[in-house]
Image (cartoon, rainbow, N blue to C red):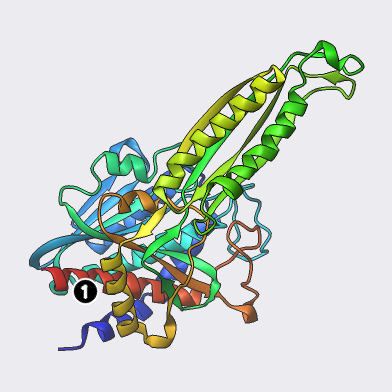
C-alpha cells in the first residue's frame, strides 16, 4: 500500500490549481466580518460537490459553515478550522485577482485559509477509506472582530460537540517565514486582545479662567502617562504585556476647556492571571487621578480573545508529523510568541489543539508585505503545503488515537 504521507503529498499537489482558483475567487470578492454570505455559499457548494457527509450552513444563526467527513473506520473526531472574513482595507497590489469590492480586502490571508481547508476537505473525501473516525471542518466567520459571531459564539452553540471533538488544528499564513515552511511552538503563542474605553469628566470653562473649571485634558494627560506605568511597574518584566492607547479625542476650540476627554486602547497579555489584574489596576489608577483633580471617570473594559496557548501534546505531535511529511528543514520550532491576537484561542480553552504558521514569503515574487497591509499577498506555491499539512495531521491524529 502506498505510504500515507506520499499519497497526501501527491493528492495535495494535484489539487494545487483548484486551490489557487478558489483562493483567487474568494480574494476577488471579500466580505467583512459577519457578512460572509457569498463566501459561505461558495464553501457549502464545494463541500457538497466533494461528497462531505454533513454540511451545515448558517450554523447557530451565523455565517459559519460546518462540514463532517465520516471515515470508513470507527474512531474519534478531529477538527480543522479556517476563518473566512476580510478587512476594511483598500487593496493596492495591482494583481489581476485583486479585490473587486472597494475598501474591502483579504489582507490577512483568510482567503488562503478557506481555500486550503477546501482542498483538505476534497483530499480527505478521496481518502475516506484511510480515515479512522471523523473530520469536522469549521469555516468560521468574524475572526477579525470579537464583537460578532466568531469562535466564541460557535463554541457556545456546540460546534465542538455532536460528535465531540478530541483535538483541533488550524493554519495561518505568515509572511515572516519562507514560502512552504511551517512553524509552531507549545505553550503561549499569541496574546489576549482586550479593549478599554475611558471617559474623563471635568467642568468646562474659558481657557483664560482654568481655575473656574476642572480640566479633563490635564487629567487625561496624567491618566495616559500613569496607565502606561502599569506594565512597567506592576507586571513582572519577564511576563510579556502591552498596554497601548491608540485613540484620544476631546475639545472643540483652542480657547475652551472642554467638559470631557475620551480615549481608548488595547491590552495584550500571554498570561490569564496578568490579564485579570491589569484592568483592576487601571481602574484604581483612574480613580486616584480623577479624585485628586476633582474630576470623574467612566471605565469600560471589553474582553476580546484570550491568550492562545498551544496544547503541548498536540503541538509536539504536530511538529513530529509535519517533519515526517515535509522534512526537518521545512519545519521550524518557533522560539517566541507574538503579541497579536487570534480567536482560535477560544477553541483551545475547550479542547487540545495547535495553531500553526505557514510561511508565504517570497522575495523574488515581491511577496514581502506584512499582514493587514494593503499590498499583502500570498505565495500560492505554499497552498498545497497547507492542504497536505491539514490533511496529514487529521489522518494521523485519528489513526494514532483510534
Q: Give the farthest residue toward the top.
A: 212
Name which residue lies at 36% across and 84% down: 326
Quadrant location of the N terminus? bottom left
Q: Is residue 262 above or below residue 74?
A: above
In this view of the protein, which residue sits in the foreground, 248 or 78? 248
Q: Quadrant of residue 203?
A: top right
Q: Is residue 17 visible?
A: no
Give the vertical position of 230 relative to 290 (above or below).
Answer: below
Quick check: can you spot residue 64?
yes
The residue under the point 53% across, 36% down is 281
Q: Whole-percent x and y of residue 106?
A: 54, 56
Q: How many marks?
A: 1
Q: Is residue 139 above or below residue 362?
A: above
Residue drawn where x is 57% and y is 50% of the image = 242
| Secondary element at image label 1 | helix
Percent x, y of residue 100: 60, 53
Q: Local crowd at mark 1 within 10 Å, few (<14), some, or many (≥20)?
A: some
**Residue closer to the observer: 238 or 276:** 238
User: Residue 274, image x and y in percent?
Assistant: 45, 46
Q: Which residue is mark 1?
A: 396
**As displayed, is residue 200 above or below residue 190?**
above
On the rendered structure, is 302 left or right of 197?
Answer: left
- Give the residue drawn at x 19%, y 47%: 161
Q: Which residue occupies the extreme left position in the image?
A: 74
Looking at the picture, tell me which residue is in the foreground, 21 or 206: 206
Please identify the quadrant where the C terminus is shown: bottom left
Residue 296 place in picture, x, y as percent? 64, 18
User: In this rendering, would 231 be left or right of 13?
Assistant: right
Amino acid at each position: 500500500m502506498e505510504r500515507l504521507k506520499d499519497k497526501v503529498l501527491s493528492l495535495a499537489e494535484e489539487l494545487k490549481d483548484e486551490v489557487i482558483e478558489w483562493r483567487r475567487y474568494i480574494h476577488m470578492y471579500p466580505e467583512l466580518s459577519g457578512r460572509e454570505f457569498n463566501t459561505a455559499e461558495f464553501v457549502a457548494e464545494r463541500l457538497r460537490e466533494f461528497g462531505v457527509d454533513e454540511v451545515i450552513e448558517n450554523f447557530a444563526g451565523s455565517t459559519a459553515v460546518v462540514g463532517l467527513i465520516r471515515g470508513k473506520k470507527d474512531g474519534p473526531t478531529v477538527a480543522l478550522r479556517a476563518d473566512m472574513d476580510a478587512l476594511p482595507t483598500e487593496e493596492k497590489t495591482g494583481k489581476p485577482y485583486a479585490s473587486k469590492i472597494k475598501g474591502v480586502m483579504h489582507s490577512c490571508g483568510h482567503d488562503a485559509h478557506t481555500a486550503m481547508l477546501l482542498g483538505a476537505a476534497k483530499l480527505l473525501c478521496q481518502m475516506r477509506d484511510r480515515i479512522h473516525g471523523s473530520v469536522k471542518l469549521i469555516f468560521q466567520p468574524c475572526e477579525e472582530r470579537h464583537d460578532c459571531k466568531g469562535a466564541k459564539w460557535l463554541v457556545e452553540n456546540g460546534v465542538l460537540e455532536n460528535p465531540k471533538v478530541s483535538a483541533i488544528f488550524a493554519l495561518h499564513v505568515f509572511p515572516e517565514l519562507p514560502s512552504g515552511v511551517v512553524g509552531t511552538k507549545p505553550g503561549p503563542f499569541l496574546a489576549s486582545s482586550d479593549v478599554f474605553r475611558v471617559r474623563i469628566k471635568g467642568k468646562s470653562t474659558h481657557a483664560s479662567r482654568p481655575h473656574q473649571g476642572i480640566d479633563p485634558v490635564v487629567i487625561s494627560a496624567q491618566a495616559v502617562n500613569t496607565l502606561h506605568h502599569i506594565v512597567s511597574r506592576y507586571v513582572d518584566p519577564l511576563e510579556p504585556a502591552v498596554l497601548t492607547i491608540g485613540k484620544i479625542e476631546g475639545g472643540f476650540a483652542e480657547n475652551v476647556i472642554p467638559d470631557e476627554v475620551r480615549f481608548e486602547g488595547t491590552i495584550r497579555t500571554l498570561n490569564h492571571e496578568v490579564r485579570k489584574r491589569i484592568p483592576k489596576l487601571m481602574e484604581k489608577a483612574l480613580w486616584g487621578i480623577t479624585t485628586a483633580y476633582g474630576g470623574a471617570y467612566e471605565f469600560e473594559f471589553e474582553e476580546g480573545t484570550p491568550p492562545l496557548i498551544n496544547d503541548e501534546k498536540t503541538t509536539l505531535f504536530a511538529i513530529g508529523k509535519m517533519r515526517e511529511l515535509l522534512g526537518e528543514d521545512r519545519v521550524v520550532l518557533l522560539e517566541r510568541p507574538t503579541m497579536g491576537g487570534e480567536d482560535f484561542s477560544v477553541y483551545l480553552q475547550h479542547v487540545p489543539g495547535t495553531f500553526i504558521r505557514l510561511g508565504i514569503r517570497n522575495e523574488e515574487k515581491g511577496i514581502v508585505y506584512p499582514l493587514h497591509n494593503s499590498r499583502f499577498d500570498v505565495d500560492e506555491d505554499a497552498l498545497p503545503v497547507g492542504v497536505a499539512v491539514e490533511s496529514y495531521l487529521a489522518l494521523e491524529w485519528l489513526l494514532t488515537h483510534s
